[in-house]
Amino acid sequence: MYENKIFEDKLKKLEKEKLLRQETVYEYSHDVEYISDGKVLINFSSNSYLGMHRDSRIIKASKEAVEAMGTSSIASRLVCGTLPIHAELEKKIAQWKGSEAAMVLNSGFQANLGIIQALANKDSLILADKLVHASIIDGIRLSNAKFQRFHHNDMDSLNRLLERYSDIEHKIIISETVFSMDGDKAPLEGLIKLSKKHGAFLYLDDAHGAGVYGSKGRGPTAEVEGVDLLLGTFSKAFGSFGAYACMSETLKKYLVNSCRSYIYSTALPPAVIAANLKAVELLDQQEYESKQKMLIERCSRVRDVLKNKGYKVVDGEGPIIAIIIGEEHAALQKSKELLVKGFLVPAIRPPTVPKGTSRLRLTLSSLHSDKQVKYLLNLF
Ligand code: PMP
């Protein structure tokens, strides 16, 4: 048996620093209600911003697909795992976003890992926003590219780096449209302008923008004009699983031949693809328009109430509301207090966020009732 002392010591260190994470089992009860340890909790931490994971039309499409095609796609995409619905979903995504082509990948994490690794090599330079998601950082590491971060949403900082490294031909700028732990938006016009000015490839992760914002829920980048690769996930507003990337036909051909997480992993199963397809169709038909509008209005009201009560809330428009507390211990304490009252609002701590910026990450869904939101706000 392997001696586990090394890992035990690491765990002890995490515990001492109050950074040890543990999983809790949450049993689904109804809409946003979950049960843990026999206690009903109102969930203010999910990414299903529109409650699409409970949409009966999507559930029906998923059930029908599993009945018709079975539980697996039985191979990776390039072997024999591409079923007609995979192709249909890619076509639908491209039409919905107005891109030349789209690729469906197995998860947002896998997509960032595989695509970034395929796009860059040791001769490339990647400039990424300071707050990009862990999967982007890991993709950059895998690529072996030179890597610099620019200050969060700071276009002067990005411009300075682009000028400093002007001799490097292959430059990639990476950012997110809506930041996952802060809920603020990136300055898209500035990013597009700088990528054009310096001839850099622009890569945007729209995981938290798609579905929620813009006409037909197409995200802050309604069309992909000026963006070389736009990544989205089905795991947030779409209430499902998997990812997509919008790009040119040429780039798609290249990635089909080089993106390792696409080539070497079993394709998403029919039930998941059918759910994703139905979700995009519903967004495209504007079936969710009133929910999107109601959600954005609610987010703005909640931000205002929290700010008026003296809380430090990151500016934004959408359903990720970051309430900065500061120290890990204080954030954990507030989260526990809310839990005792029946509300699930997690504390997010380093290393997920920078030290000293521990926070409560409150996410709103159109499934919450006004009463539930009001009760929660009364506890602040
Ligand atoms: N990118 C961003 C910005 C994310 O927030 C996440 C999920 N937290 C991912 C990628 C990974 O997506 P998935 O859950 O589909 O793997």
Image (cartoon, rainbow, N blue to C red):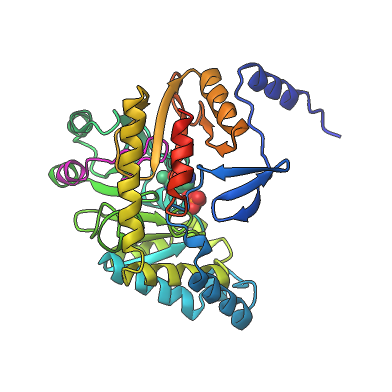
Nearer to us in this view, 51 or 276 = 51
How many numbered callouts?
Answer: 0
Q: Is residue 65 magenta?
A: no
Q: Say left or right for 5 vs 124.
A: right
Return the residue found at the far bottom. Answer: 68
- Image point 26% across, 34% down: which residue? 153
Q: Is residue 372 above or below residue 336?
A: below
Q: Name the foreground residue: 40 vs 154.
A: 40
Q: Is residue 231 above or below residue 147?
A: below
Task: Classify the position of the N terminus by image quarter.
Answer: top right
Q: Which residues are magenta?
A: 177-193
Image-quadrant location for residue 174? top left
Q: Is residue 307 left or right of residue 12?
A: left
Confirm whether residue 253 shows in the render. no
The residue located at (63%, 72%) in the rendering is 74
From the image, give the main secondary structure of the stretch colored magenta.
Answer: loop
User: As drawn, is 35 to the left or to the right of 150?
Assistant: right
Q: Is residue 188 magenta?
A: yes
- Where the C terminus falls, by quadrant? top left
Q: Is residue 168 left or right of residue 368?
A: left
Question: Could you tell me residue 57's position as x and y percent?
Answer: 49, 73
Residue at (20%, 33%) from the top-left corner?
Answer: 155
Image position of 26 with respect to 356: above or below: below
- Which residue ends up furthest to the right in the rendered image? 1
Quarter of the figure with residue 96: bottom left
Q: Nearer the viewer, residue 190 or 251?
A: 190
x and y percentages locating residue 362 in the rendered image: 45, 38
Q: Position of residue 130 (x, y in %)?
A: 35, 31
